[in-house]
Image (cartoon, grey):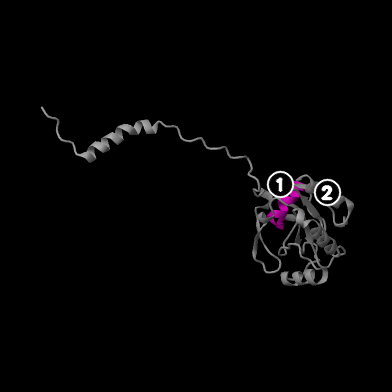
Amino acid sequence: MPRPFMPLTLALTLAACSAAPALAQTPPPVQPRASAAAPGACPAVLRHTLPRLQDESPQPLCQYAGQVLLVVNTASYCGYTNQYQGLEALHARYKAQGFAVLGFPSNDFAQETGSNAQIADFCSNTFGVRFPMFAKSSVKGAEASAFYRELAAQAGEAPRWNFHKYLLDRQGRVVASFGSAVAPDDPKIIRAIEKQLDSFR
């Protein structure tokens, strides 16, 4: 007895279905394991967006990931205000090697009463400051910004006065903390910065 006629499309469908189990048993390609921290990843301490001093536009701190950072709380009417000049010199000296000074004006010690625009004009016109600066904020106590709370937690101390300095390595870890009286050109700061810059080479 002759076999019943089977349309070509149905025959192709049945053939494909019978082959499907074999295809399904093919193991998926092995994916490479992700590293624990990809190069250039932003460390947790820098995962903040803060307003820039000059125009209050949002600035992600992650743009400084992978750099050695000196973070300083500043004030315009302080006995240490002339440290602006030394901080700018440090920034200019080591910038090409992956270093930056980050300035954070604060009125926590009642010596920074001006507006952000006034502070920006003072820093630029009086000391020629070009290093990145951020809008006025609190750096100690319950009102401290989340960024400064994390710095204080890592360092084991919050700023006790204006121009306290935290040095962060390229992984975002606080590796040194310097009081207000330690000038930017103090050999202790220079050695600490150069040690972190050299460790990357």
Q: Secondary structure at mark 1?
A: loop
134 vs 158: above or below: below
Q: Mark 2, residues whose alpha carbon is within 10 Å: few (<14), some, or many (≥20)?
A: some
Give the residue displayed 19% in from the left and 39% down from the top: 7
14 vs 181: above or below: above
Q: Can residue 162 be spotted in the picture?
A: no
Front-lying residue, 134 or 185: 185
Magenta stretch holds residue 150: yes
Front-lying residue, 1 or 20: 1
Q: CA distance from mark 2 to mark 1?
A: 15 Å
Q: Can residue 116 be spotted in the picture?
A: yes
Give the residue displayed 82% in from the left and 49% down from the top: 194
Where's the N terminus, which quadrant? top left
Give the image location of residue 118, x and y in percent: 75, 72
Sequence order check: which comes first, mark 2 or mark 1?
1
Check disc 1 and give the amino acid type: Gln
Looking at the rendered structure, the number of numbered marks drawn on it comes to 2
Q: Which residue is mark 2?
A: 192
The dominant secondary structure in magenta is helix
Magenta-colored span: 142-155
Give the residue displayed 82% in from the left and 63% down from the top: 84
Q: Mark 1, residues whose alpha carbon is within 10 Å: few (<14), some, or many (≥20)?
A: some
Give the image location of residue 52, x and y in percent: 69, 64
53 vs 7: above or below: below
Front-lying residue, 127 or 89: 89
Check disc 2 and give the amino acid type: Ala
Q: Secondary structure at mark 2?
A: helix
171 vs 93: above or below: above
Magenta stretch holds residue 94: no
Q: Which residue is mark 1?
A: 171
